Amino acid sequence: MIKRITYNICIIFLFLVIFTSSSFAVIEYTKEMEMRPIRLTYIELQKEIDKISNLIISANAAYATKTYRERENVTFLSGARKVDISGHQFFPTKIEIPSASYGFDYLFLITDERPITRVSITFNDYYRKISVSGNSPEQVDAIFSTLESGLGGYSTPIGGRFVRQMGLFFLGFLFTVIVIIGSIYCIQNKNMKMLGGPIFSLFGIILIATLPFEDILAGFAVYQGEASLLVRYGDQISFFGFLITLLGIPISYYLPSRFTSSQKSTE
């Protein structure tokens, strides 16, 4: 009987401990999202990171007297080159950063219960993701909205490895088929007026092989100085270039036939 009472008391005590600890536990709130392709300059990126860092300091200001471990750093990737910088100041800096980077990471992490405990930005050719965590949903929402609106202003509708590879593969296949079929048709029918289609398609294949689409349609890119028009609006320029090429194919077939029919009507 005494053993059973002791056992029941232990169970009740354990239940109370678990219930009490869970009641006072601080729930961490996280908000994250993936973003569209982004291209901007180091100056513009530094401005956005400074803004976020100041908001983090302001949100956690009331806890400044407590001991904690804090980490803040940025990383740039350009090919095989990787540059890690402690803190959030990277431009202008004495540290030599690449003239163009196609990968960027920012991480703020604090090992304590704070309104903002973690801010993460990961941008590369595959995907772009922002994430904010903390014990204050209001502060998390505010910083997340600033990140989304600030960096989202430099986004572009087209870019990234998947879009680039699929688009170039489809266009390359289409141009190759037109070159082969069009050339065979012209040779077999001895109709050289129809060579416009294969010629335009061959020109499209040359553009695919020579233009720097890894830079023009990058999922993420940050540049020294002002980004050029070709770089900043490279997706639109390449789109219109290919559109002109595609439109040139039916036009090249249409105009000779119209020219031939007009000649026959005058005769």
Image: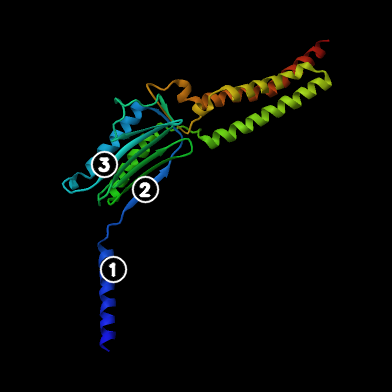
The secondary element bearing badge 2 is classed as strand
On the image, the x and y values in percent for residue 94 come to 29, 25
Would residue 222 be found to the left or right of residue 182 on screen? left
Q: Is residue 15 above or below residue 139?
A: below
Q: x, y (%) of residue 125? A: 48, 35
> Which residue extends farthest top?
267
> Which image quarter is the N terminus in?
bottom left
Rendering colour mode:
rainbow
> At which x and y percent is residue 213?
53, 27
Closest to the observer, 66 or 55:
66
* Dot 2 and dot 1 residues touching (CB under 8 Å): no
**Which of the 4 image quarters holds residue 178?**
top right
Quarter containing the C terminus: top right
Nearest to N terminus: mark 2 or mark 3 = 2
The kind of residue on which mark 3 rests is Ile
Which of marks 1 and 2 precedes in the sequence?
A: 1
Picture coordinates of residue 123, whole percent (x, y): 42, 37
Mark closer to the observer (2, 1): 1
Label 1 neighbourhood size at 10 Å, few (<14), some (14-19), many (20+)? few
Q: In front: 29, or 117?
A: 117
Nearer-the-camera pick, 189 or 87: 87
Residue at 26% of width from left, 44% of height from top? 70
> Label 3, on which residue?
56
| Residue at numbered disc 1 | 18
Q: Label 2 belongs to which residue? A: 31
Residue type at numbered disc 1:
Ile
Tag 3 or tag 1, which sits nearer the N-term?
A: 1
Tell whether 188 sits left or right of 152. Answer: right
The part of the image, by quadrant, that contains residue 183 is top right
> Which kind of residue does numbered mark 2 sit on?
Lys
